[in-house]
């Protein structure tokens, strides 16, 4: 269930400063699925939480210097155990899609919700993640009736020249 402020009741709430207002009259009609691991192939959620809060210790890993200027967020993150975290209200525009296009409409952040799965292009996702993802998608589709099944896509579909996630190990047949 989503409360009147746009927060999923069951999610662990973390506030990201990396969001802004959606354009007036924008209708939420798209879900974008991503994967993330920080550093690459490390599947702990703590560094993702820190990245989205602009609190990542760039000295703690050499890879972090390559992303030190990023200001990003997503609405939701699902860890390897299936726990859901939320960073931005569904009513606000999270900064997850970047330069993107869906059905000839640019700037997917304007009309989408971003869901990050802790993982990478190189390993399968956990059944717990699919269970939580399906539950979350059902809640979001009920809350936003303009989100149709064909409007649930990977980051690679809206930014094909830049992105590969959720990657080859994401099993689309597990999305109900």
Image (tube, rainbow, N blue to C red):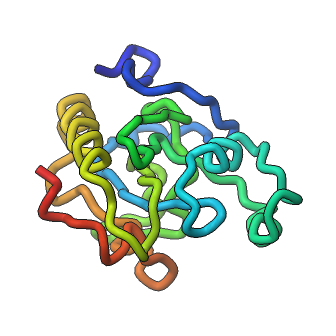
**Measured from the top left, where is residue 140 in percent x and y?**
27, 35
Q: Is residue 165 left or right of residue 150?
A: right
Residue occupying image coordinates x 29% and y 67%: 170
Q: Is residue 5 left or right of residue 48?
A: left
Residue farthest toward the top in the current orientation of the protein:
4
Which of the pair 59/144 is nearer the observer? Answer: 59
Residue occupying image coordinates x 11% and y 50%: 176
**Measured from the top left, where is residue 152 in percent x and y?**
25, 56
Is residue 1 shown above or below 42?
above
**Measured from the top left, where is residue 26 in percent x and y?**
39, 43
Is residue 45 shown above or below 64?
above
Residue occupying image coordinates x 19% and y 64%: 172
**Measured from the top left, where is residue 158 in percent x and y?**
38, 70
Residue farthest toward the right in the current orientation of the protein:
59
Residue occupying image coordinates x 73% and y 60%: 70
Which of the pair 101/25 is nearer the observer? Answer: 101
């Amino acid at each position: 269930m989503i409360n009147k402020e746009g927060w999923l009741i069951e999610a662990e709430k973390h506030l990201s400063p990396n969001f802004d207002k959606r354009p007036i009259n924008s209708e939420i009609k798209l879900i974008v699925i991503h994967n993330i691991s920080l550093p690459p192939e490390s599947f702990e959620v703590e560094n993702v939480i820190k990245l989205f809060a602009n609190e990542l210790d760039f000295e703690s890993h050499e890879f972090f210097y390559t992303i030190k200027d990023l200001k990003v967020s997503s609405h939701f993150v699902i860890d390897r155990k299936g726990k859901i975290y939320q960073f931005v209200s569904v009513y606000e525009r999270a900064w997850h899609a970047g330069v993107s296009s869906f059905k000839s409409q640019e700037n997917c952040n304007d009309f989408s919700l971003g869901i990050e799965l802790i993982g990478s292009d190189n390993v399968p996702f956990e059944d717990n993640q699919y269970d939580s993802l399906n539950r979350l998608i059902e809640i979001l589709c009920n809350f936003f009736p303009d989100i149709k099944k064909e409007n649930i896509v990977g980051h690679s579909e809206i930014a094909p020249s830049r992105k590969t996630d959720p990657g080859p190990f994401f099993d689309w047949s597990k999305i109900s």
